[in-house]
Image (cartoon, grey):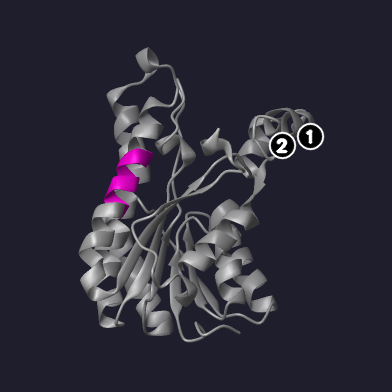
Amino acid sequence: MSDAVQKVALVTGATAGIGRATALALARNGIAVVATGRKRDAGAETVKLIEDAGGRAAFIAHDANLEDEWIAAVSGTLAAFGRLDILVNNAGKIIVKPLDSLTPEDMQTMLRANLESCFLGMKYAWPHLKAAGGGAIVNVTALMGERTAAIGVAYSAAKAAAMALSKSAAIEGARDKIRVNAVMPGLIWSDGWQRMAEPDPDTTKANVGKTVPFGRFGETSEVAEVIAFLTSDAAAQITGVDFPVDGGKNAG
């Protein structure tokens, strides 16, 4: 167990992928985890995985795009564990289309899912982090927020905005010992990639993975370990950082 044994984390989008891996990584460090998401069965599975490993967890059904549900999620976290120390804004959505096919509704969807969801989480977690004497927030953005792609206009713009949001909040939060960082995953093998790669995911994984300097996709657990570090006391001097987890893709 780490020195974080008394801490409580709220992790959005924790029903699969990076969110679930993060919930598990935090729980291994002795942190009580509230996992949120839209899929109740998958959320219950995340909780069971944590509890079977000896950790403490609860699930709250939660649409991170909705203000009322953020209020309920934070209240539910306090009801379950009595405090809130860590927020991981992982829930998000991607739309990739040519620019002239994008609609204003697409852009609004990207902004709500990838920017406003982070803002709402920070807004309602903030006073409780202050009350705890400080805390840590990680917004999961994307490498595409910095190294954009031709048909990722709306998604890249929203993720870039979330990175700017994180930096500004880091400056504001410093006086209250609230650290805010962004993690930028690159090519990470997930359920979404698995679905897109059908009917031959192994070939797609190998071929697309070659575009990464490391020669492979990253794993969700590798992103989760970075998030666990950034929310730990070992990262007490780190705030306002855009942290790539991309196998070197942003460097070359």
Q: How many marks?
A: 2
Q: Considering the whole magenta stretch, tell me its main secondary structure.
A: helix
Check residue 55 for magenta coloring.
no
In the rendered view, tell whether residue 65 sits above or below residue 195. Answer: below
Inspect the image, locate mark 1, and give the three-letter code of the amino acid beneath it: Asp
The quadrant in which the C terminus is found is: top right
Question: In the image, residue 174 lies at what x, y percent?
Answer: 25, 68
Query: Which residue is at a point 36% across and 20% down the rendered structure image?
Result: 102
- Please say if 161 is above or below 12: above
Residue at the disc numbered 1? 202
Which of 170 and 106 lies nearest the eye of the viewer?
170
Residue most extreme to the top: 100
Q: Which residues are magenta?
A: 159-166
Q: Amino acid at mark 2?
A: Gly
Q: Secondary structure at mark 1?
A: helix
Q: Nearer the viewer, mark 2 or mark 1?
A: 2
Mark found first going from the N terminus, 2 or 1: 1
- Report if residue 41 is visible in the image: no
Q: Residue at x 64, y 77 (%)?
A: 51
- Disc 1 crowd rating (10 Å Cα; few below 14, some 14-19, many 20+) is few
Q: Residue at x 37, y 64 (%)?
A: 137
Give the image location of residue 85, x and y in percent: 38, 76
Where does label 2 land, which residue?
A: 215
